[in-house]
Amino acid sequence: ASSIQQPPLLHYYINLLLHKLTMFRRIASSTSVRSAFGKAVVARQAAAASNTTTIATASKVPRSQYASVRSMSTMDTMESGTKTYMSLYPEGSTDGGLRLGNIVPDFACDTTHGKWDSFHEWKKGKWAILFSHPADFTPVCTTEIGRLALKYDELNAMDCLLATLSVDPVKSHEEWLRDVVAHCENEIEVKFPIIGDPDRSISTAYGMIDPGTSDSQDLPLTIRAVFIVNPENKLMLALNYPACVGRNMDEIVRCVKALQLSYEKSIATPANWPHNHADIPLADGTRTTEFEGSVFLLPTVSEEEAKENYPDHMTCEVPSKIPYLRLVKASDVK
């Protein structure tokens, strides 16, 4: 990592995250900071490698398997883009909690589609959504599985696998699915597997339930959780909802699209994407609608690679004069 040419924006972004420095231009010109950052990245990668080995051993998945998965990924090869950006997220945590960037726990389980020996093997080399619901035969969960079934084909076309889970046994899932299909106003077929987790081991490993209190609870429900996992088995997004609020399936699909685009093109999606930047000012005082649905270059992307890969990108002018708002038209990242 220390051999990677680190652009000024990368220094700004890292130090912004760490709350260490606030002056962008001072960071950009500091050789000592560059050197320190290089050492920090090396140390972080070493720690991540150690944590990954521990996770792999605990779940009986050889570390070599992770390497084979990585070789199949669609991560952008731009050196200063997604590759560098992802190095900021450690692959394992020091306290056992599951956080963004961590390799998700592997598990064996029974599902409505048969037995799995390994979740990692089931999704090998693909994006996947693990979608938990509190319990079978409950009103909100019934509507959620029905609406999720309507999104299955769209997610499948995006090469994204889908599995749902609750602490109920598989037999309960199978009986409940008849109600799900009957209640949904559209004709649906539930094509994705539903995982049975009656011993709560998966729910505990993913932080959806507290092992210290679940035995004493009358109704040990998992939270409504969504985990979106990339081809390298890293957690890229997590959503938690209470039992009383149903999830929006359009938002989940939007998140998968945004994550895949970022992963493959070294970009970041703005707020409300793709309904963003519909009318913006230009340097000459005129306005344009050409950047509707546009995206930002990741802060780690160097100016050299930005010019090479996205020559038509536009940098928005702001009072700070820091050139970090680099817009790329939607048509340039398809």
Image (spheres, grey):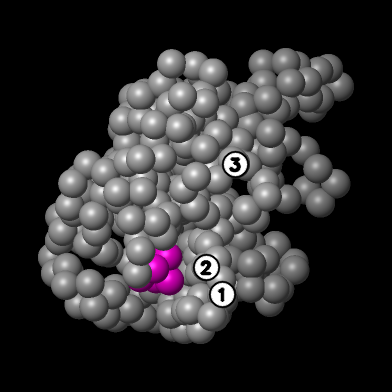
Could you give the CA–CA distance between mark 2 and mark 1, rounded to whole angstroms? Answer: 5 Å
Q: Is residue 110 found left or right of 304 in the rendered image?
A: left
Identified by mark 1, the residue type is Gln
Location of residue 204 in the rendering, given as x and y in whole percent from the top left corner: 43, 71
Occupied quadrant, residue 199: bottom left
Which element type, helix, strand or loop, lies under badge 2? loop
In contact (CB < 8 Å): disc 2 and disc 1: yes
Quadrant (top left/top right/bottom left/bottom right) for the C terminus: top left
Identified by mark 3, the residue type is Val
Q: Which residue is mark 3?
A: 140
Q: Which residue is mark 2?
A: 220
Give whichever of 303, 10 is nearer the camera: 10
Q: Which residue is mark 1?
A: 217
Which element type, helix, strand or loop, lies under badge 1? loop
The stretch of residues the image draws in magenta is 200-205
In magenta segment, residue 204: yes
Which element type, helix, strand or loop, lies under badge 3? helix
Residue 48 higher or lower than 255, as above or below: below
Whichever of callouts 1 and 3 sits on the residue coming sooner in the sequence is 3
Residue at x 61%, y 36% (from the top left corner):
248
Location of residue 327 in the rendering, given as x and y in whole percent from the top left corner: 62, 33
Disc nearest the viewer among 1 and 3: 1
In contact (CB < 8 Å): disc 3 and disc 2: no
Q: Is residue 269 found left or right of 311 in the rendered image?
A: right
